Image (tube, helix red, strand yellow):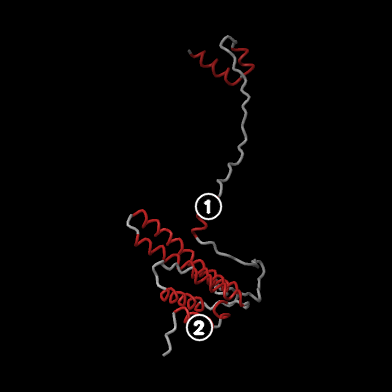
Amino acid sequence: MTEPKSSKEKFTEKLTSMDLKAATGAEDGDLQHELIRQAVSAIYPPSSLQEGETMTRASACVTALAALKPQDETEGMLAVQMISVHNAALECLRQAVARGTPEGQDLSLRQASKLMTVFLRQMEALDRHRGKGAPAVNVEHVHVEAGAQAVVGTLKATPPQERKRARRASPSPALAHQPVIQLDLERRPTSSVGADERLKRYPVEATVNTKVGSHG
């Protein structure tokens, strides 16, 4: 009677039958096996996990790697990183549940949140690498009428939040230099100067003062 195959033997057979190039995006055999090893090593299995369960998780990890369908070595490395970050985020969530103190739970949840944010950025990077980012608009012919203007180049709309941050970061405009007006005030004569002398220096003021004095 044939003995049932162990989980390790099943996993080895799975790797043997798989198209490793399709699973990793790599042409070189050594790089294919290295990428798979890196992905499997990021499973974080508990020490109490039996070998069969560990091999099952490793098999699922390789299946997830192949599901991302990396097209080249760069996408293969990024796919491995995505699987590793995904596993790390779930491990942090598991630790948040296991920890008994609010401080420990908060720490694990914050770490999980950061890792999940990294995972979303990795997805965006993979889409950009595959040309699934912002749609490109190709303009072949530009007709500019008389008196009009045209802009040729790449135009990028800045999101409102970035515009607000740019305005807060930019220094306040310097005040324009205001010229200093210097007044050359001549010292007024004292009361000891006679009316005739004051009339010579300040004809209008002296005349008014003389008339006022005469009425008094």
Residue, x 54% and y 17% (percent of image)?
Answer: 209
Q: Quadrant of residue 196?
A: top right
Mark pair 2, 1: CA separation: 60 Å
Find residue 81 and report its horizontal and vertical position in percent. 52, 68
Q: Position of residue 164 (x, y in %)?
A: 50, 55
Q: Nearer the viewer, residue 10 or 212?
A: 10
- The numbered disc on residue 196 is none
Label 2 SS: helix
User: Which residue is pictured at 49% across the width and 70% down the height?
Assistant: 83
Q: Give the label, 2 or 1, closer to the camera.
A: 2
Residue located at (54% from left, 61% from top): 158
Residue 167 badge: 1
Callout 1 amino acid? Arg
Residue 21: x and y, percent?
Answer: 58, 80
Residue occupying the point 54% across, 50% down: 169
- Tell me, yes or no, whether the two marked residues, 2 and 1, touch with CB atoms within 8 Å: no
| Residue at numbered disc 2 | 13
Judge by depth and name the residue closer to the eye, 111 or 39.
Answer: 39
Give above or below for 123 relative to 160.
below
Q: Amino acid at mark 2?
A: Glu
Q: Is residue 178 above or below residue 144?
A: above
